[in-house]
Image: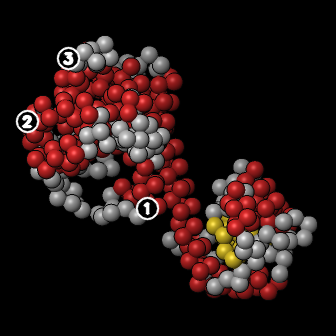
Amino acid sequence: MSDQTFKVMIVDDIAANLEVLEDLLSSKGYQVSAFPRGDLALSFAFQNPPDLIFLDIMMPFMDGFEVCRQLKQDARTQDIPVIFISALDDSENKVKAFTHGGVDYISKPFQEAEVYARLQTHLKLSQNQKLLEAYAHDLESIVQEKVQEISDSQMATLIALSNLAEFRDETTGSHIERTRDYCKLLAQYLSQDKDYHNQITPAFIHDIYLAAPLHDIGKVGIPDSILLKPGKLMPQEYEIMKTHVNIGAETLEHVLSQYPKNTFINMGVLITKYHHERWDGNGYPSKLKGEEIPLAARIMALADVYDALRSRRPYKVGVTHEETMNIIIHDSGKAFDPKIVQAFIALEKEFELIFERHAQSKPLI
């Protein structure tokens, strides 16, 4: 991140505070604008939006809470991170600052090193969010273009959409092939169960085979620095990674709005959004529990985890089939639908064969 490219606004009615912060940030290469009054700062921000704002609370004419409220109501400034910096150190005002849209709170007297560290952190978060939104916008445009070109061919649409996720990660192609085979295998087995006989029809099996490759399409909206990171994600990075389910689902929902009778895209929405939910309700994004989770997503959840555990990545070795079985069985009733786990146990040899058969597969093209 280049400090020189960012504009920072400071709003404080105490001249000494303005001077200290302005000197600190200017010395680090930031473009600084300083204002002793909130109304003056608002007028400037609406015309020249900064990248981040340090905002005092107790000021004449207009306090910091009102300044922040107006910033968040205007489309030009609503996404600018606001860090409150105030002598008010009680929890009530801190909570009020966050409810008005602040991203952080620094108490006076402040330490320059703390101010600078928090500034850098929130600028990085803001830039990542903008990048994420740009990726999502590009993703929707690409999907619309692809679907328009091949709107009469479901399989061609499937391959085009799958490629969007695939080109970001060279391991994805084999994963797509294997997971769709696992899903079809599980669905066929479960269709023989009286509890699923009416739900898992031949059409369901057909659709889950076509829709399964779409489950991680939203990862095209995740920055490379996170998606391809060779190691454990930091908590903030993991929260960004988790957004792939909503990015993918929203993209497919837009496609579905144009082709509402397309059953495999409809199933793709459900799989994409909910395949990281857990049977015990501790998954994401909606913390659905048990049969609240769509059946297709419950099937994909097990298929996805099996393949992820078995697969070798730059940051981990693959787990053996036997170890993977033990992990999935242990998580029956926790992460996974117990009935789907029982189906997996019955089909475990077929799972192993599918993994070995596609171990060296090339990506779908």
Please name whichever residue, 45 or 326, is drawn nearer the observer in this view of the structure. Answer: 326
Gap in Å between the C-alphas at discs 2 and 3?
Answer: 19 Å
Mark 2 or mark 3: name the one nearer the start of the chain: 3
Residue 363, percent across and down? Answer: 22, 41
From the image, state whether disc 2 or disc 3 is nearer to you.
Answer: 3
Depicted 331 relative to depicted 212: above or below: below
Q: Mark 2 Cα within 10 Å, few/some/many (few <14, many 20+)? A: few
Q: Amino acid at mark 1?
A: Pro
* In-front residue for pair 49/89: 89
Residue 160 appears in the rendering: no
From this view, report whether residue 66 is shown above or below residue 349: below
Q: Which residue is mark 2?
A: 349
User: Which residue carries the number 1 mark?
Assistant: 235
Depth order, front residue of 340/57:
340
Residue 229: quadrant of the picture: bottom left
* Label 3 neighbour load within 10 Å: few <14, some 14-19, many 20+: few
Q: Amino acid at mark 2?
A: Lys
Q: Is residue 257 above or below residue 120?
A: above
Q: Secondary structure at mark 2?
A: helix
Colouring mode (rainbow / by chain / secondary structure / one colour):
secondary structure
What residue is pinned by disc 3? 192
Answer with left or right where residue 193 lies relative to residue 347. Answer: right
Q: What residue is at 28 percent from the left and 18 percent from the top?
A: 195
Task: Name the N-terminal-most of marks 1 and 3.
Answer: 3
Asked which secondary structure carries label 1, the reply is helix
Quarter of the image containing the C terminus? top left
